[in-house]
Image: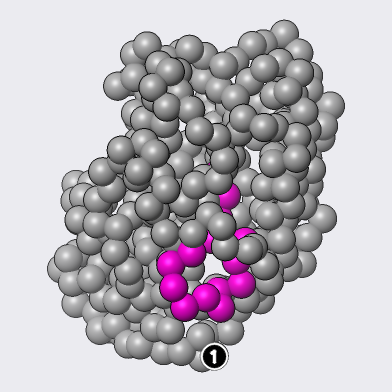
Amino acid sequence: MKILVTGSNGQLGSELKLLAAVYKTFDFTFIDVEEVDLTQADSIRSYFAAKQFDFLIHCAAYTAVDKAEEESRLAYAINADAVKTLAEVCVEKKIRMIYISTDYVFDGEANQPLTEMAVPSPVSVYGKSKREGENHVLSILSNAYIIRTAWVYSTFGKNFVKSIRHLASQRESLGVVCDQIGTPTYAFDLASAILQIVEAVAQGRVDEPGIYHYTNEGVTSWYDFAYFLVRESKLNCRIQPISTAQYKTAAVRPKFSLLDKSKIKATFALQIPHWSESLKVCIEKLSS
């Protein structure tokens, strides 16, 4: 089973690299911008020309949410146009795709957990570009998996957890938004879930393509997330709740992005850890 992973230097790609050693029956190839320029269709097609894979786990994306508001062309080139080309290549070469998407495809105005049937209505350039990527996958590939996730963090790369720990080690207090609700996702847990899905499909146990939602279990705000993080990290910094209105950003953030995970748990019999337990694991890794 040959598996190609894009975005190998990102949070999710880096966690998949760690897990690759566990899945010894899989033959992994990891690529990033050095190997393929996703803004160029010719670069994508050239890379695949003499290669064959069974699965493509497409983690690579333009994720600078605020910067996307002024770099919309680049965001769409990577999050939409490149995905279209990749989907076309997957059809031509009979490759199964797993496309990683985001809670930003929703407008954040819901008041109950969002199922896969919820109607997307993105309000930011990032969200709109990712939704367009979803649409390309859905229209071109009938056997692809789209996994939406949210609030991703890891020991790798730049993320909320690492930023808060750094700032809290230098300051007496920090203001963190308290009126945006969702669930953090430890990238290691998401990577593990993805490979369990690949394994189930490869072994013929389960194969039900479509859209799925995945985050850790539980619900929290960014404020409560930061409060727990600072306390568990044993840092002497006071976390202060502030409103979204007090924290100006170029892109609109979803106020409510709690994703319902019933479908992915039932389909693949996944055991998903609570966000607080996974955060403790990440903190321990960062501390050591």
Q: Residue 41's spot in the image, x, y percent?
A: 82, 32
Q: Is residue 224 magenta?
A: no
Q: Main secondary structure of the magenta part?
A: loop
Residue at x 84% of width, y 27% of height: 42
| Residue 40 falls in image quadrant | top right
Q: Residue 259's spot in the image, x, y percent?
A: 44, 61
Q: Is residue 101 magenta?
A: yes
- Nearest the camera: 162 or 139? 139
Q: Is residue 55 visible?
A: yes
133 with respect to 157 (left or right) = right
Residue at x 57% of width, y 16% of height: 54
Residue at x 36% of width, y 30% of height: 196
Residue at x 45% of width, y 41% of height: 12
Q: Secondary structure at mark 1?
A: helix
Q: Residue 266's spot in the image, x, y percent?
A: 35, 43
Q: Residue at label 1?
A: 245
Magenta part of the chain: 100-114
| Residue 190 falls in image quadrant | top left
Q: Residue 224's spot in the image, x, y percent?
A: 29, 76
Q: Is residue 47 visible?
A: no
184 with respect to 69 (left or right) = left
